[in-house]
Image (cartoon, rainbow, N blue to C red):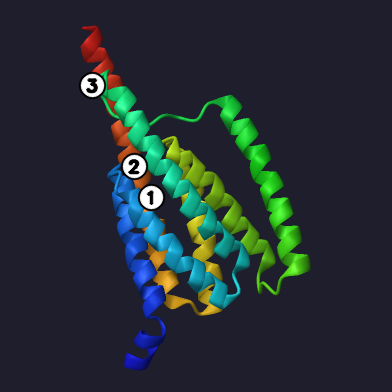
């Protein structure tokens, strides 16, 4: 057991910071972004060592998008403070849903082709699916779009099965937590979003 812990210490550290990240995400706490940066750096190494090249590149994307998300949430909050409110949760509109779906299909097709032809990824299709959905969901998070939780639920469910087959058990535990907390996050963000309507009605009165 001691040897296993020593061999997987980096992966365990990434799993712990990843759990903290999702908890902060649900709470809309801006510190999720620096914690996300630490998680991404850790998992760049972990996924590289296990041959999950798309997931490794995804972590590079997470690293970049976390810096942007940190800026976007801070900048958005500063703008909204003039209105005495935070950067608020929103629902996805039809136009955004259409172009996001198209972009998802393109990313998946390119990712699948590259992984299948040019890498030794053990599961190129599912690696591409997980990566694509995660890219889209993370972008939605930077804009606080509620439907990001639906995307995370699907991506995490697929990831759990894939990582079980690969034997990456600390990461499996992390993604089980991700899956459960994505469901919790969906309900929490729905509750907060519904409260906006109540606030608006009270303001009108």
Q: Is residue 88 visible?
A: no
Which residue corresponds to the image point at 33% horizontal and 63% vertical from the top-left?
17
Q: Secondary structure at mark 3?
A: loop
- What is the CA distance from the residue labelled 1 to the residue labelled 2? 7 Å
**Mark 3 vs 2, N-terminal side:** 3
The crowding category of the residue bearing disc 1, from other C-alpha atoms within 10 Å (few below 14, some 14 to 19, many at least 20), is some
Rendered-image quadrant of the C terminus: top left
Q: Tell whether 187 sits left or right of 137.
A: left
Q: Which residue is mark 2?
A: 187
Q: Nearer the viewer, residue 10 or 187?
A: 10
| Disc 1 + disc 2, Cβ < 8 Å | yes
Front position among marks 3 and 2: 3
- In three-dimensional space, the C-alpha distance between marks 3 and 2, rounded to whole angstroms, equals 25 Å
**Is tag 3's residue or tag 1's residue first in the polypeptide sequence?**
3
Label 2 packing within 10 angstroms: few (<14), some (14-19), many (20+): some
Dot 1 falls on a residue whose secondary structure is helix
Q: Where residue 183 is drawn, which disc sits there?
A: 1
Q: In the picture shown, does residue 163 fall above or below 26?
A: below
Horizontal and vertical percent position of residue 51? 60, 74
Q: Position of residue 117 (x, y in %)?
A: 78, 66
Q: Residue furthest right?
A: 117
Q: Of the residues tagged 3 and 1, which is closer to the observer?
A: 3
Q: CA distance from mark 3 to mark 1?
A: 29 Å
The image quadrant of residue 196 is top left
């Amino acid at each position: 057991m001691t040897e296993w812990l020593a061999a997987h210490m980096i992966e365990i550290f990434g799993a712990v910071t990843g759990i903290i990240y999702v908890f902060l995400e649900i709470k809309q706490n801006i510190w999720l972004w620096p914690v996300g940066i630490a998680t991404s750096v850790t998992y760049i190494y972990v996924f590289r060592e296990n041959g999950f090249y798309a997931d490794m590149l995804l972590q590079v994307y997470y690293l970049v998008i976390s810096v942007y998300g940190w800026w976007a949430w801070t900048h958005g909050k500063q703008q909204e403070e003039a209105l005495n409110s935070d950067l608020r949760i929103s629902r996805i509109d039809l136009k955004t849903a259409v172009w996001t779906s198209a972009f998802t299909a393109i990313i998946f097709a390119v990712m699948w082709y590259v992984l299948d032809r040019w890498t030794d990824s053990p599961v190129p299709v599912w690696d591409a699916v997980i990566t694509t959905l995660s890219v889209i969901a993370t972008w939605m998070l930077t804009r606080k779009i509620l439907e990001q939780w639906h995307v995370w639920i699907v991506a995490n469910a697929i990831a759990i099965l894939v990582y079980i087959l690969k034997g990456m058990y600390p990461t499996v535990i992390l993604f089980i937590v991700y899956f459960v907390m994505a469901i919790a996050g969906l309900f929490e963000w729905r509750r907060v979003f519904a409260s906006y309507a109540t606030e608006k009605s009270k303001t009108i009165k």
